[in-house]
């Protein structure tokens, strides 16, 4: 065990104890100026601990977790200590209690928004973008015509079609899925076309000299080369899909759904539940992103960005 | 949104030769599909209105393209609405799209500037301080998997309840959205000088600030512009969504919302086109600044 690691772990233990004490104090009643001195000291200790721990490759992995927990702690202490009004910002502990108390409600919202609208919309939008890209790929003329337009459309505020889709497909999840399809289509299209253009002439000539057919070249050479781009689009789209479905729900929903919950509970100033819904959405977003990143790692293991850094 | 284009500047190889004709053909095809779609989607209502009277196809076509509240307005209806609200209305009027566009644009630009500043500062910190890199970078990425856009209305309402109204809440949402591509792009850019160049600086005994200003910063500028283009587009989206909560008085998002409440589809489409034009103009502006800056820095184009 190196010195940096030992001091880093020492500081971490000190930090955890200090944070536990601070939480105990702040929930015990009103706090004095001395308490904020303690928090300042803890900030310094946290900085030292993070700095030492990130020097070691072994412990560098847990640093983000520690940092996240540290931010949560600061949030809790500041909100409780300064007695910030609940309407402005509830404490993490209050949000946690709300989550635990309204699991059924949150689950119903999650199913309505994520399972019914986001996932099918994401699959359809990405699938359609991929297929259209493959079709366009055979015609350089279409490629030249569609790529600039696709690039332009990806930069447009497509989210604005949400009210139109709600009018066309009604209030239920179909309209949200439609918004998701439109939002995810163009990033996938543009990225797949760019990815399919990644192979060099030498590689394609090699396939040609093997007398490989168009499909053989596609499956064996061009699709694998396009995978980093395709996964990039899949990951962008995972976030976009969630945003699209939630925003579309602001324009009309049945009385269930995460976007509906956020907009109505904001109106009633019931911020605990809003934050609980946001926490669920954030968790769903991060998990799907992480899952995609994991699959990407397995599929494109050959890519230079995954080589171990020296 | 199109975070794909962060990364290597000019990463996507576009076939440059003769793009005008294909683009024109595709645009015409889209217009054609739009007109046909307008007939197809509006026909049921039109036929319903005819009742038992006999009707011809020409009549159906003409009526489907000139409905008051169509399911899908024809492009020329949107053009007429745009002409009416942009050129025929005084810019100070609440019916003018220029007025609403300006409200959105000002929030977009303020948020964009704040986000750029924050993004660059974070990137500089991440590149220079090891503890920041390991602790902050994962959270910068995680922060983007949170559908912040969906809570934009809440941010507006909550900030409004403490007296912050008008431009700032929307700009804050834009800022949150657009700092990310800038941070990612700038971290890549500031790290882009190769080992030889940094070692050369080292042999010249350059101070860290000299290394930054004479090597890292110039190397990062192309990356910065690639990120700026993504960021301005997202910033606009953020401003528009920030205008959607009930009670928003002005802006493109408010136009979308009121159009959806009163079934004014033509108004929604006109607002959408206005937003798209804004996005296009902003990106074109950044392209121009990029070209001028890179030329002034002696880049080969």
Image (cartoon, coloured by chain):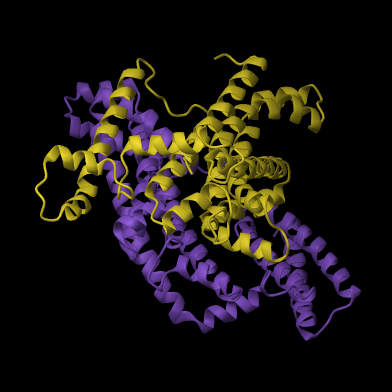
Q: How many marks?
A: 0
Specify the quadrant of the image occupied by residue B293: top right
**Residue A40 in view in this figure:** yes
Query: In the image, is B247 to the left or to the right of A254?
Result: right
Q: Which chain comes out purple in the rendered image?
A: A
Residue A97 on image: x %, y %: 59, 81
Residue at position x 34%, y 57% in the image:
A167
Q: Establish if A78 lies above or below B186.
A: below
Q: Is residue B296 left or right of residue B226?
A: right
Using the rendered image of the protein, determine whether residue A304 is visible from the camera's viewpoint. no
For the residue pair B268 and A65, the one nearer the viewer reads as: B268
Residue B277 position, x and y percent, is 48, 34
State the residue at coordinates (73%, 41%): B128
Establish if A277 lies above or below B22.
Answer: below
Q: A159 and A202: which one is in front?
A: A159
The one of B250 and A268 positioned closer to us in this rendering: B250
**Which image quadrant is residue B102 in?**
top right
Which quarter shows the C terminus of chain B?
A: top right
Above or below, comparing residue A115 to residue B264 in the picture: below
Left or right: A142 as drawn, with respect to B179: left
In the drawing, does residue B116 fall left or right of residue B62? right
For the point 23% across and 48% down, which residue is it?
A: B41
Q: Which chain identifier belongs to the yellow chain?
A: B
Q: Position of residue A256 (x, y in %)?
A: 41, 73
State the image coordinates of residue A171 (x, y, percent, origin top left): 35, 64
Question: With respect to residue B48, does B293 lie above or below?
Answer: above
């Amino acid at each position: 065990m190196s010195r940096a690691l030992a001091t880093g772990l020492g500081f971490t233990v000190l930090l955890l104890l200090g944070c536990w004490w601070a939480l105990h104090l702040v929930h015990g009643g009103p706090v004095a100026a001395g308490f904020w001195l303690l928090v300042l000291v803890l900030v310094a200790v946290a900085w030292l601990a993070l700095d030492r721990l990130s020097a070691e490759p072994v412990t560098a992995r847990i640093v983000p977790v520690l940092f996240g927990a540290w931010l949560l702690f600061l949030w809790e202490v500041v909100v409780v200590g300064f007695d910030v009004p609940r309407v402005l910002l509830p404490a993490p502990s209050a949000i946690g209690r709300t989550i635990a108390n309204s699991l059924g409600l949150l689950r119903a919202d999650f199913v309505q928004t994520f399972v019914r609208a986001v996932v099918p919309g994401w699959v359809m939008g990405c699938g359609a973008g991929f297929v259209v890209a493959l079709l366009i790929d055979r015609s350089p003329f279409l490629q030249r015509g569609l790529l600039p337009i696709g690039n332009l459309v990806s930069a447009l505020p497509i989210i604005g079609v949400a009210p139109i889709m709600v009018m066309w497909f009604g209030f239920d999840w179909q309209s949200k899925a439609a918004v998701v399809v439109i939002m995810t289509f163009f990033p996938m299209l543009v990225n797949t076309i760019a990815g399919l253009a990644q192979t060099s002439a030498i590689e394609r000539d090699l396939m040609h000299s093997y007398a490989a057919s168009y499909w053989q070249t596609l499956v064996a050479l061009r699709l694998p080369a396009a995978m980093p781009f395709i996964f990039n689009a899949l990951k962008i789209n995972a976030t976009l899909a969630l945003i699209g479905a939630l925003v579309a729900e602001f324009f009309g929903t049945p009385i269930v759904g995460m976007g509906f919950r956020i907009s109505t509970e904001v109106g009633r100033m019931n911020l605990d539940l809003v934050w609980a819904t946001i926490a669920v959405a954030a968790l769903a977003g991060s998990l799907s992103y992480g899952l995609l990143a994991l699959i990407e790692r397995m599929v494109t293991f050959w890519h230079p960005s995954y080589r171990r850094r020296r | 949104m199109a975070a794909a284009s962060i990364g290597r500047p000019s990463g996507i190889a576009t076939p440059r030769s003769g793009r005008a004709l294909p683009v024109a053909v595709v645009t015409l095809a889209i217009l054609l599909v739009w007109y046909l779609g307008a007939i197809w989607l509006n026909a049921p209502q039109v036929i319903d209105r005819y009742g038992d009277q006999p009707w011809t196809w020409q009549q159906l076509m003409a009526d489907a393209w000139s409905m008051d509240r169509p399911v899908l307005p024809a492009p020329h209806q949107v053009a007429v609405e745009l002409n009416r609200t942009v050129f025929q209305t005084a810019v100070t009027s609440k019916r003018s799209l220029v007025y609403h566009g300006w409200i959105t644009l000002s929030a977009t630009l303020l948020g964009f500037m704040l986000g750029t500043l924050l993004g660059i500062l974070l990137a500089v910190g991440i590149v220079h301080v090891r503890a920041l890199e390991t602790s902050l970078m994962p959270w910068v990425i995680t922060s983007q998997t949170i559908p912040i856009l969906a809570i934009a209305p809440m941010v507006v309402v909550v900030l409004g309840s403490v007296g912050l109204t008008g431009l700032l809440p929307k700009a804050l949402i834009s800022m949150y959205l657009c700092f990310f591509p800038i941070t990612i792009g700038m971290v890549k850019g500031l790290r882009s000088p190769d080992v030889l160049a940094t070692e050369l600086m080292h042999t010249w005994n350059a101070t860290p600030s000299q290394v930054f200003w004479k090597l890292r910063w110039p190397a990062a500028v192309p990356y910065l512009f690639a990120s700026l283009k993504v960021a301005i587009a997202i910033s606009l989206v953020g401003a528009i969504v920030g205008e959607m909560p009930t009670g928003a008085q002005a802006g493109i998002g408010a136009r979308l919302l009121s159009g959806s409440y009163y079934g004014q589809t033509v108004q929604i489409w006109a607002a959408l086109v206005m937003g798209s034009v804004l996005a296009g103009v902003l990106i074109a502006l950044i392209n121009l600044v990029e070209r001028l800056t890179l030329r002034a820095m002696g880049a080969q184009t």
